Amino acid sequence: MPTFAWQAKIRGERGLAINVESVGARNPAPDPSTDVKGRADAGTQRPARILVVDDEAHVRAMMGSALERQGYDVQLAASGHEALEILERNAFDLVLTDIVMQDGNGIALLERVHGQQPQLPVVMVTAIHDISVAIDAMRRGAYDYLLKPFEREHLVSTVQRALDHRVVLQESHTYQQNLEQVVRARTEMLRQAMDNLENSYDVTLEALGDALDLKDSETEGHSKRVTAYTIALARAMGISPIEIKVIARGAFLHDIGKMAIPDEILRKPGTLTPEEQEVMREHCTRGYHMLRKIPFLCGAAEIVLTHQEHYDGGGYPAGLRGGEIPIGARIFAVADTLDAITSDRPYRKARTFDAAREEILRCSGTQFDPGVVEMFLKMPGELWNELRSEIDLQSKRYSAFDIAHAPDLPSL
Ligand SMILES: [Fe+2]
């Protein structure tokens, strides 16, 4: 390596500006204006740790000694390779490295350090004719550079500036992390609150569905079964979970408008007259108007309104056809018929799931969307049986609960 003026000065030649021996003699106590203990690590108050990398022993020694006399904790490395080994085992607050060294250049070391510890400042030390390299080093992430020859004061002030910069970076990083933690915690709280709210909504809906089942005894358990069938079909059709929630609520409340139908029509054992049928058909729009003003049920209201539409336009209330009918309502239509056929009615016994499959296939393209029917037929028949048994079991558990024999219940 070329000999520079500052190296000559270290050897005690004329014009010595920085001298390993004289640095301490001229300024034996740490400079109070550079309170490294406080600035290097505000949390631990420990001295800042600096790694000095230079392949020339006397340069290393000079810089190390000058910095130690300032109160810094200094470690020396004779090559980029050794520096990397030391960095693997120890934590530092700053790296000071020569640019041109025998085992490679300081730029490679800079890139490794910057890649692995982006918050660790690296100051490059270079001779004046390397100025373009030094600038290039800064583009690659070096914090600053020191031009040889340099005064001790210049070394100290550059080091302190770099350490201050590191503190600012660390504080900003910590602030960012805290902020992210706060945002994550708040988001989770909000999500839980939304979940709780949604659960409360669904419990309310269940009560509404149960109320309807009580009013319309012919459909006991129908709302829950048809919801389960609709969900299973919607999943098989690849509908998104968010949309399935909306469809499920619509399926569960599909006949909610029957609450507004007079009992003498709703519970009439015989065939309805045309006028009575007309009143009965109003349950779709009545249900729709009941739900549409409730924000979290406006999507479900659409299913309620269209659940009696037929794929070929032969349904009611609007005679919609094909894709005009929401997909949820087209899926529901199949599920509803499946449950109707496989449930007892006062005027007939329940038929088998195979019979329901035949009937649904027969009405594909007229009452039902052929795409939904195709998916329904691909699904295993036992699935519907299992779902039905599960829901029946739940209903039995509920109805078997005898309030008179529940001693722990508070008296009303
Ligand atoms: Fe209906």
Image (tube, rainbow, N blue to C red):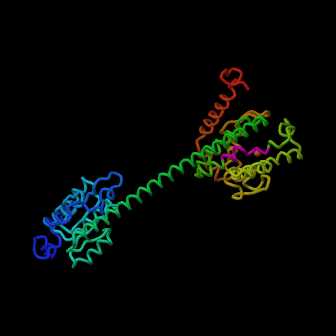
Residue 295 % position (x, y): 70, 52
Residue 284 % position (x, y): 78, 49
Residue 56 % position (x, y): 14, 67
**For residue 239, side relative to residue 55 (left or right):** right
Residue 182 % position (x, y): 50, 52
Closest to the observer, 224 or 7: 7
Closest to the observer, 394 or 151: 151
Closest to the observer, 166 or 314: 166
Which image quarter is the C terminus in?
top right
Q: Which residue lies at the image location 13% right of the left edge and 66% below the top edge?
A: 58
Residue 113 occupies which quadrant of the picture? bottom left
Q: What are the residue bounds of the magenta stretch? A: 248-257
Displayed-image quarter of ligand 1? top right
**For residue 188, side relative to residue 298 (left or right):** left
Can residue 401 be seen here? The reply is: yes
Can you say whether 227 is above or below 36 in the image?
A: above
Q: Which residue lies at the image location 71% right of the left edge and 21% below the top edge?
A: 404
Q: Which residue lies at the image location 59% right of the left edge and 52% below the top edge?
A: 240
- 184 falls in the magenta region: no
Give the main secondary structure, helix, strand or loop, of the magenta stretch.
Answer: helix
Can you say whether 408 is above or below 243 in the image?
A: above
Can residue 364 be seen here? The reply is: no
Closest to the observer, 180 or 260: 180
